[in-house]
Amino acid sequence: MNDPALKTFVDTLWDADAIPTLQDYIRIPNISQMFDPDWAEHGHIEKAVRLFEAWAREKIKVLPGATVEIVREKDRTPLLLIEVPGTGAGNVLMYGHLDKQPGVTGWFDWTGPWTPAIKADKLYGRGGADDGYAMFASLISLLALASQRLRYPRATIVIEAGEESGSPDLTHYIDILADRIKVPDLIVALDSGCGDYDRLWLTTSLRGIAAGTLCVKVLTEGLHSGDAGGLVPSSFRILRQLLSRIEDATSGAILLEGCAVEIPAERLEQARACAEIMGNEISKKLPFAGNTRPMATSPVELILNRTWRPQLAVIAIDGYPKPEAAGNVLLPETVAKLSLRLPPSCDADKAVAALKNALERDSPYDAVVTFETEAGQAGWNAPSMPAWLTETLNGASQAYFGHPVAYMGEGGSIPFMAELGRKFPAAQFLISGVLGPKANAHGPNEFLHIPTAKKLTAAVADALTALAESK
């Protein structure tokens, strides 16, 4: 492996070809189906998948036997499938997605969710880092190996269009394409995060989710607060009581039985190593308001809070007017959308059932309380890496980033990762990403850190050729 030559190839192809295409992709408002029920009529997802298809079709011409196809099924989002016959041993499945979160407000005035801009090595715009870049990184890694006549494994690249909606179509596609995907030795997914931009970060675990909408109803219509106050219990106060069954209001600790798990010793050791690397930057990178403090002072505890402990977030409230339009009215109901992050090894379906039972049983004042659940999303804990992959990735991190590899769990979810683990229990995983400090996926000013995308691409190439030579 000629690392400098490979890096030059990767950098050149990213600059000349991939970045301009990603800018065109950012201009497409192809938000995910959950946020755009009329996605098929609007055609934005179709435009994005055709853009990716055209780029891939042009590039695979130098890979003998490679094909690209848009796979379609009625009433499902399309899936881009790229198949590359190997020149060496092994079979790899490479994953990414091209659907996006909504644009939201708060972007810098010189960019926007659908207005790409490059500033200080960062490509701003919705979807560039989460996760549009993944197809380019995956295919460029194979092209880089071919450019040096190095062996690479058989590769299947799947780019779905529904990840931000929980990947409702992906299991179906993986099943119907089973004969073409075969059984992978290695699964590569680049939809994760990184603790900084100075090294290769490998994701070791992902949290799951138990979610739903809690409604507390005390009246059939609103009443004058001076007339009804003291007679009718406040729906908001009842909501507070119910949430206290789930979460300690002072510490934020989750009280729901079955949500806490024993953290594996290997993950504790990795959390300590991450704390040594990141120190207080773990919390300093966050946009705290005023003098707000993080939930712990110890970097290790903050890492474990974010990756292996359950946490509750109230992500929406309904039933209330805006402050400027509010009258002195005791409101008839309070509705809250709850999102409970679960430890990687927690049973999500059991957590959803426990959450519903805790909130609906014995309602205060016999108020009408309902909790409409959503399907639980399982977390994921990576299998231990074999020596050849550990050594390869550490060497790649040293070669392209200048620092050793780092291992850290992520607090968010990649909904399909647990399913992949169940389908392919013997597969190894290479999960990484470019969502580092202030990259702000899902929020305003999301950016792709271009140098990290390039270095990660080169590191993936090293792993692929190592797999091709490992058998």
Image (tube, rainbow, N blue to C red):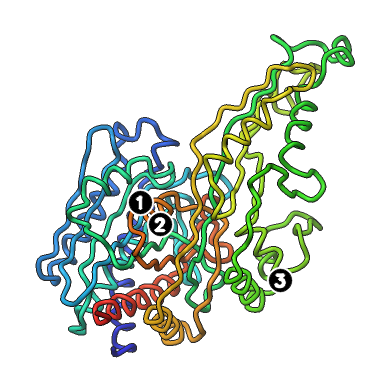
At label 1, the amino acid type is Leu
Instruction: Return the x and y of residue 36 as percentages of the image width and height.
Output: 41, 34
Give amino acid for label 2.
Asp
Q: In terms of secondary structure, where does tag 3 sit?
A: loop
* Residue at the (44%, 56%) spot, across then down: 130
Q: Which residue of the protein is positioned furthest toward the left in this rendering?
A: 65
In the shown orientation, is residue 250 left or right of residue 356?
right
In the image, what residue type sits under mark 3? Asn
Can you see residue 320? no
Q: Nearer the viewer, residue 301 or 264?
A: 264
Q: Tell me which label, 2 or 3, sits earlier in the chain.
A: 2
- Residue 407, disc: none
Q: Give the labeled residue for mark 1.
A: 98
Element marked by disc 2: helix
Relative depth, front residue between 322 and 174: 174
Cα distance between the residues tagged 3 and 1? 33 Å
Query: Which residue is rendered at x = 51% and y = 85% of the image?
Result: 403
Against 357, is 106 above or below? below
Q: Which mark is residue 131?
A: 2
The answer to whether the residue labelled 1 contacts the one labelled 2, judged by CB atoms less than 8 Å apart, is yes
For the point 33% across and 88% down, the residue is: 3
Residue 462 image offset from top left, x and y in percent: 33, 80
Which residue was labeled with disc 3? 280
Disc 2 from disc 3: Cα separation: 28 Å
Looking at the image, do the residues carrying marks 2 and 3 touch, with CB atoms under 8 Å apart?
A: no
Q: Nearer the viewer, residue 155 or 437?
A: 155
Q: Earlier in the sequence, mark 1 or mark 2?
A: 1
Q: Specify few, some or many for label 1: CA neighbours under 10 Å numbering under 14, 14-19, or 20 or more.
A: many
